[in-house]
C-alpha cells in the first residue's frame, strides 16, 4: 500500500506582484522510497507547500517531472491524499461522515464504509465522537478526525502540509506518537512538510532541507533513531541541531542574527 | 413575541382612534371572525399559499440552479452580473403591466412576473454564496476524490447553503411584493382574492375588510417565516457550530 515519489529537476513559478513571475521552486530533485516517511523542512516561503501540490497533482511543474509509483502525475487522484494545516473537515457533516467522505467518492459500499470508518475512528481515539460535528471537537480531536479521514482512504502516498503547526504542544506531542503508529500500521509513503526542525527529526526516516528564494534542496539528514520518538529526546534534539546547521550555513534562519526586512524563520 | 405583539396591537388601536378612516383592532377582528365564519379567510389563505408556493418553487429551483452555474463560471458571471444586479434593484412590479398586455390578464401572467421577479435575487445570492465557499474545503473535496457534479453537490452546495437560504428569504419577500402590485394593478390577476378585496375597498371607502385581509396575509407570512425560514436558518447554524451554546463546562 505504498508508492515511491520521484521529483526530477522540478521548477515551479507563480505570478508575482506587477505581472512578473517568481520562482517558487528551482531544480528540485527528490526521491522518496515506497513506504518511507520523508520530512521536508525549510523556512516559510521556500516552496514546501508547492512541492506537495505538485505531487498531489493540484498544479503542474513549469519544468521537470513528478512521478508517483513510476507513473507521471497527471492530476489529483485518490492514491495521493493531502492533510492540511487546518483540519479542513466539512462542518455540515458528522465526524463519521467526514471520515467516510473519501470512501464514498471512490464508490465503497455503505457497509464496508461503515466498517472502515469505525476502525479508523477507533484507531485515532474518536470512537465516541462519531456522531458529533467538527465544531464540537477540540483542535487536536479535529486533526485526529482529519488523520482518520486520510488513512481510511488507504492512500499510496500521504501528503502532510504542516498538519500539527496550529495545535497546542501537548496535543501535538500526542499526535506525533499516534502518527508514527498509524504510519507503521498502514505502511504508506509519507511526505511531511514542516517548518519545525525537531518535529521533522522526530517523525522522519529522513529530513530533506530546503532553502528559500527560490526553493531548492540544500541537504539531507538520515534519521536512524528508534521509534516511536518524541521531540524532547536528546538524540532528536542533537540531530535537529545538525539540520539547523545546514539551514544556518545557507543563512536561512536568522534567529541568532536578526535580519531586518527579510523572511525566513525556522523553529528548532 | 407575545409582548411585542401586544405593543403593536396597542399602537394600532391608538392610530385607529386618531384616524377616522382606519378601522381599529376591534372592528377588524370582528370582520376577520366573519370572514373566518363564511370561509372567505380560509379561501384567501389557501389560494395565496397555492399561488405563492407554485411561483416560489419555480423561482427557487431556477434561481439556485442558475446561481450555481454563475458561481462555477467566472466569465459568464462577469458578463451577466451587471444585468442581474440591475434587474434585482429594479422594482419587479414594473413588469406587471408589460406581462398583463403581452401574456393577457390571467393568473399565469402574474405568476410569470412573480417567479421571474424573485429569481435575480436568488441567483445573485447563490452566486455570491458559491464564490464565498472557503477554497480549503474545495481542495479537501478534490483531494478525497470529489469531482464535477459530485463536488458541487457534496461540497459547494452544502457549504454555500446558509447564503442560499438568505437569498431565498429575500426572493420570497420580493415575490410577495410583486403579487400585491399585480393585484393593485388589475383587480383579480392572481386569483388569490386579494385583488377583489382591494377593489371593493376602493369602491366603498371602507377599509375594514382590507385590514382583515392584511392580517390574513401577515399571519401567512409569519407562519412561513417561523415554520420554514427561521427553522432552516437555525438548523444550518446549529449544525455548523454558529450558535453560541455557552461554555461546555
Image: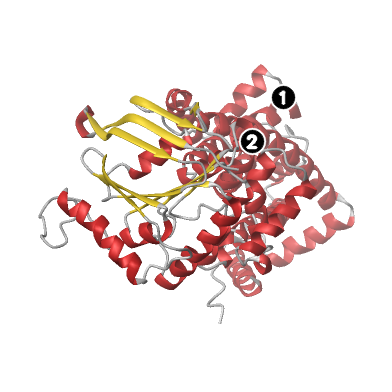
Q: Which residue lies furthest to the bottom in this view?
A: B249
Number of labels in the image equals: 2
Of A19 and A35, the residue lying toward us: A35
User: Residue A92 lies in what quarter of the image?
Assistant: bottom right
Report the residue at 12% width, 51% height from top.
A261
The residue pinned by badge 2 equals B150
Quarter holding residue B1: bottom right
Q: Can residue B223 be seen in this view?
A: yes
Q: Position of residue B134 (x, y in %)?
A: 47, 46
- Residue at 56% in and 56% down: A184
Residue B215 in view, yes or no = no
Q: Is residue A123 above or below residue B193?
A: below
- On the image, the x and y values in percent for residue A205 come to 42, 53
Q: Is residue B107 left or right of residue B98?
A: right
Q: Nearer the viewer, residue B208 or A19?
A: A19
Label pair 2/1, CB-CB below 8 angstroms: no
In the rendered view, tell whether residue A176 sits above or below residue A207: below
The subunit letter for the residue under badge 1 reads B
Which of pointers 2 and 1 indicates the residue nearer the eye?
2
Q: Name the residue under label 1.
A: B105
Question: Residue A85 at what x, y percent from top left?
Answer: 43, 54
For marks 2 and 1, give the CA distance. 43 Å
Asked if A48 appears above or below B24 in the picture, the reply is above
Local secondary structure at mark 1: loop
Numbered tag placed on residue A260 in the rendering: none
Q: Which residue is drawn at 59% across and 30% down?
A: B148
Q: Assign the C terminus of chain A to one quadrant of the image.
A: bottom left
Amino acid at each position: 500500500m505504498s508508492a515511491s515519489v520521484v521529483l526530477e529537476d522540478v521548477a515551479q513559478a507563480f505570478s508575482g506582484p506587477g505581472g512578473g513571475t517568481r520562482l517558487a521552486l528551482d531544480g528540485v530533485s527528490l526521491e522518496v522510497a515506497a513506504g518511507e516517511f520523508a520530512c521536508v523542512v525549510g523556512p516559510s516561503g521556500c516552496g514546501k507547500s508547492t512541492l506537495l501540490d505538485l505531487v498531489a497533482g493540484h498544479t503542474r511543474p513549469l519544468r521537470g517531472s513528478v512521478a508517483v509509483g513510476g507513473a507521471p502525475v497527471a492530476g489529483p487522484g485518490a492514491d495521493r491524499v493531502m492533510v492540511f494545516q487546518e483540519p479542513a473537515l466539512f462542518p455540515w457533516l458528522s465526524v463519521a461522515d467526514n471520515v467516510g467522505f473519501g470512501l464514498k467518492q471512490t464508490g465503497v459500499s455503505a457497509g464496508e464504509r461503515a466498517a472502515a470508518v469505525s476502525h479508523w475512528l477507533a484507531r485515532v481515539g474518536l470512537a465516541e465522537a462519531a456522531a458529533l460535528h467538527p465544531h464540537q471537537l477540540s483542535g487536536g480531536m479535529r486533526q485526529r478526525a482529519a488523520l482518520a479521514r486520510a488513512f481510511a482512504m488507504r492512500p499510496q502516498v500521504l501528503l502532510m502540509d504542516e498538519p500539527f503547526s496550529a495545535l497546542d504542544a501537548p496535543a501535538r506531542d500526542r499526535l506525533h506518537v499516534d502518527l508514527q503508529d498509524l504510519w507503521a500500521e498502514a505502511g504508506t509513503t509519507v511526505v511531511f512538510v514542516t517548518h519545525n526542525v525537531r518535529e521533522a527529526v522526530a517523525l522522519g526516516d529522513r529530513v530533506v532541507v530546503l532553502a528559500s528564494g527560490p526553493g531548492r534542496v540544500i541537504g539531507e539528514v538520515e534519521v536512524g533513531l528508534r521509534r516511536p520518538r518524541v521531540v524532547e529526546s536528546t538524540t532528536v534534539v542533537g540531530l535537529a541541531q545538525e539540520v539547523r546547521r545546514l539551514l544556518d550555513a545557507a543563512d536561512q534562519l536568522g534567529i541568532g542574527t536578526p535580519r531586518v526586512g527579510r523572511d525566513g524563520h525556522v523553529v528548532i | 413575541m407575545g409582548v411585542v405583539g401586544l405593543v403593536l396591537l396597542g399602537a394600532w388601536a391608538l392610530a385607529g382612534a386618531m384616524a377616522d378612516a382606519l378601522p381599529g383592532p376591534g372592528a377588524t377582528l370582528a370582520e376577520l371572525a366573519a370572514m373566518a365564519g363564511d370561509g372567505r379567510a380560509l379561501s384567501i389563505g389557501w389560494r395565496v399559499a397555492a399561488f405563492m408556493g407554485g411561483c416560489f418553487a419555480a423561482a427557487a429551483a431556477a434561481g439556485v440552479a442558475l446561481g450555481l452555474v454563475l458561481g462555477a463560471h467566472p466569465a459568464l458571471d462577469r458578463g451577466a452580473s451587471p444585468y442581474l444586479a440591475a434587474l434585482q434593484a429594479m422594482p419587479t412590479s414594473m413588469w406587471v403591466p408589460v406581462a398583463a398586455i403581452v401574456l393577457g390578464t390571467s393568473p399565469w401572467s402574474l405568476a410569470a412576473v412573480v417567479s421571474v421577479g424573485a429569481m435575480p435575487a436568488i441567483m445573485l445570492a447563490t452566486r455570491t454564496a458559491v464564490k464565498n465557499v472557503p477554497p480549503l474545503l474545495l481542495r479537501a473535496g478534490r483531494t478525497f476524490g470529489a469531482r464535477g457534479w459530485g463536488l458541487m453537490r457534496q461540497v459547494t452546495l452544502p457549504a454555500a447553503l446558509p447564503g442560499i437560504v438568505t437569498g431565498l428569504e429575500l426572493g420570497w419577500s420580493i415575490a410577495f411584493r410583486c403579487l400585491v402590485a399585480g393585484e393593485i394593478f388589475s383587480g383579480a390577476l392572481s386569483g388569490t382574492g386579494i385583488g377583489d378585496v382591494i377593489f371593493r375597498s376602493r369602491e366603498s371607502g371602507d377599509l375594514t375588510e382590507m385590514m382583515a385581509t392584511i392580517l390574513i396575509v401577515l399571519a401567512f407570512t409569519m407562519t412561513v417565516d417561523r415554520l420554514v425560514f427561521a427553522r432552516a436558518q437555525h438548523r444550518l447554524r446549529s449544525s455548523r457550530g454558529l450558535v453560541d451554546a455557552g461554555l461546555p463546562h
